[in-house]
């Protein structure tokens, strides 16, 4: 266990060869942004809890510093997404609760494109969509 300054923040936890590695807590900026959880060779990898400067939170899995796997995201309005993540984006099975309305969603390439279309995501581009709720 040790403590060290990294990029304007303070890390308290385990190290391997001067890299954050094992369990630790990193707090940066004056607004209280904090990550506490598992690290692997300097990257958030494993289980962790992230509180962002805007007050939103994520509790779940990380791979190479990105939300990846199962996790729960809650924004400052109290809207919640509980589901799968891939490369820091909602992807796969999940449940979204927004404004008191709960919706089960599945996000994947096969949901967005017909099977005979070429996959525009293969070239590194991305597509997104929004779901609007009416009470």
Image (tube, rainbow, N blue to C red):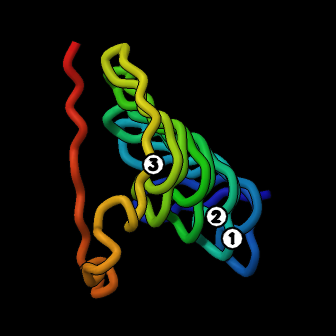
Q: Indicate which disc residue 106 carries.
A: 3
Which of discs 1 and 3 lies nearer the camera? The answer is: 3
Q: Are marks 1 and 2 in contact (CB under 8 Å)?
A: yes
Q: Secondary structure at mark 3?
A: strand
Q: Which picture quadrant has residue 131?
A: top left
What separation in Å lies between label 3 and label 2 (alpha carbons)?
24 Å
The residue under label 1 is: 40
Which residue is farthest bottom? 123
Decide which of 116, 23 is in the foreground and name it: 116
Q: Secondary structure at mark 1?
A: strand
Question: Is 113 situated above or below 73?
Answer: below
Report crowding for label 3: few under 14, some 14 to 19, many 20 or more residues within 10 A (C-alpha).
Answer: few
The residue under label 2 is: 45
Disc nearer the start of the sequence (3/2): 2
Decide which of 52, 4 is in the foreground and name it: 52
Q: Residue at x 33, y 84 (%)?
A: 122
Residue 132 horizontal/vertical position (percent): 20, 31
Q: Are marks 3 and 2 in contact (CB under 8 Å)?
A: no
């Amino acid at each position: 266990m040790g403590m060290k300054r990294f990029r304007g923040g303070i890390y308290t936890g385990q190290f391997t060869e001067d890299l954050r590695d094992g369990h630790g807590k990193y707090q940066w900026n004056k607004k209280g942004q904090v990550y506490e959880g598992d690290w692997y060779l300097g990257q958030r990898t494993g289980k962790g809890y992230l509180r962002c400067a805007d007050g939103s939170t994520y509790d779940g899995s990380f791979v190479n510093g990105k939300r990846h796997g199962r996790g729960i995201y809650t924004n400052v309005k109290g809207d919640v997404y509980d589901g799968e993540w891939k490369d820091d984006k909602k992807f796969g099975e999940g449940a979204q609760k927004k404004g008191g309305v709960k919706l089960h969603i599945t996000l994947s390439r096969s949901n967005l494109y017909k099977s005979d279309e070429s996959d525009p995501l293969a070239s590194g581009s991305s597509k997104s969509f929004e779901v609007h709720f009416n009470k």
